[in-house]
């Protein structure tokens, strides 16, 4: 199925470091969502973006809606061990019709060493 | 308030068997969506139901079916199981259809087909 491309695929960092990851699509999206998934759990919504160029923060997390509407970025500042998990970008399918079905990215695995 | 509840949490089935997965949405939420997450990938949309009607279907074979009950709970059925159906099956609930991306995901049902 269709998926968004995320990079990097994985990151192994030291506690306190800043993290950047991105998500790209070949199609235009009108909404970008960032989720975090812990092992054995479902994804949890971190940030939602609704306008091109929008920059939104949630604590140490900041996400941006790319101007081309084909990409989005997530930054985590001063990482801590509980930031460990898989981060997914997602957006409503351009071909979703009446549904609000989401297309998910391939995920970025983040590991933080204390 | 209880979150999205899925049962069972884990399941092992044999190829060719049938399985039923259950989901109870957050109280007041009328829309339920089902996603399949294969290990190492992002979730893939299977179905969305809103007010007991199917709103959308992903690119999955007819072996996959679902329904939503008057109390808005939902069941996902998979017939003639294949090894490739092994995955985490996620249920997500939201208030309604349309441009509502306020999904809350359950913790999922881990299905293993042997």
Image (tube, helix red, strand yellow):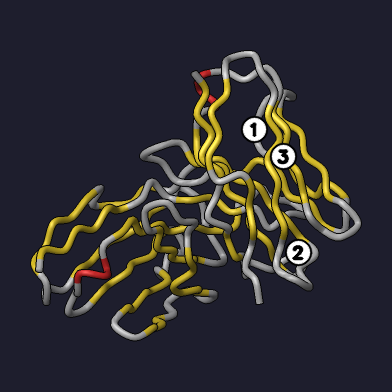
In the image, is B1 to the left or to the right of A107? right
Instruction: Please report, as a chain letter, where disc 1 is located.
Output: B
Residue indicated by mark 3: B76
Q: Quick check: B13 left or right of A25?
A: right
At mark 1, the secondary structure is loop
Cα separation, mark 3 vs mark 1, equals: 15 Å
Q: Earlier in the sequence, mark 2 or mark 1?
A: 1
10 Å crowding of disc 2: few (<14), some (14-19), many (20+): some
Q: Are marks 3 and 2 in contact (CB under 8 Å)?
A: no
Structural crowding at the residue carrying mark 3, measured as other residues with C-alpha within 10 Å and reported as few (<14), some (14–19) or many (≥20):
many
> Which tag is nearer the camera, tag 3 or tag 2?
3
The residue shown at (26%, 62%) is A84
Mark nearer the N terminus (3 vs 2): 3
Real-space Cα separation, disc 2 to disc 1, in angstroms: 20 Å
The subunit carrying tag 3 is B
Q: Chain of mark 2?
A: B
Label annotation for residue B59? 1
Residue annotated with mark 2: B98
Residue B5 visible in this rendered orientation of the protein: yes
């Amino acid at each position: 199925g269709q998926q968004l491309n995320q990079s990097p695929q994985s990151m192994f960092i030291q506690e306190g470091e800043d993290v950047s990851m991105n998500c790209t699509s070949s199609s235009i999206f009108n909404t970008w969502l960032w989720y975090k998934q812990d092992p054995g759990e479902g994804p949890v919504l971190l940030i939602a973006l609704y306008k091109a160029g929008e920059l939104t923060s949630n604590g140490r997390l900041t996400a941006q809606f790319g101007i081309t509407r084909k990409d989005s970025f997530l930054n985590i500042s001063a990482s801590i061990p509980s930031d460990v998990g898989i981060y997914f970008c997602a957006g409503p399918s351009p071909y979703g019709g009446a549904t609000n079905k989401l297309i998910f990215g391939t995920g970025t695995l983040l590991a933080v060493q204390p | 308030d209880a979150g999205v509840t899925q049962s069972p949490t884990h399941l092992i089935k044999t190829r060719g068997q049938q399985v039923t997965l259950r989901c109870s949405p957050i109280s007041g939420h009328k829309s339920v969506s089902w996603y399949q997450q294969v290990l190492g990938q992002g979730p893939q949309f299977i179905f969305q139901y809103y007010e007991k009607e199917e709103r959308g279907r992903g690119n999955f074979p007819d072996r996959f079916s679902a329904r939503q009950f008057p109390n808005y709970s939902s069941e996902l059925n998979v017939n003639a199981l294949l090894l490739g159906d092994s995955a985490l099956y996620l249920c997500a609930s939201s208030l309604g259809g349309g441009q509502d991306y306020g999904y809350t995901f359950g913790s999922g049902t881990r299905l293993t087909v042997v």
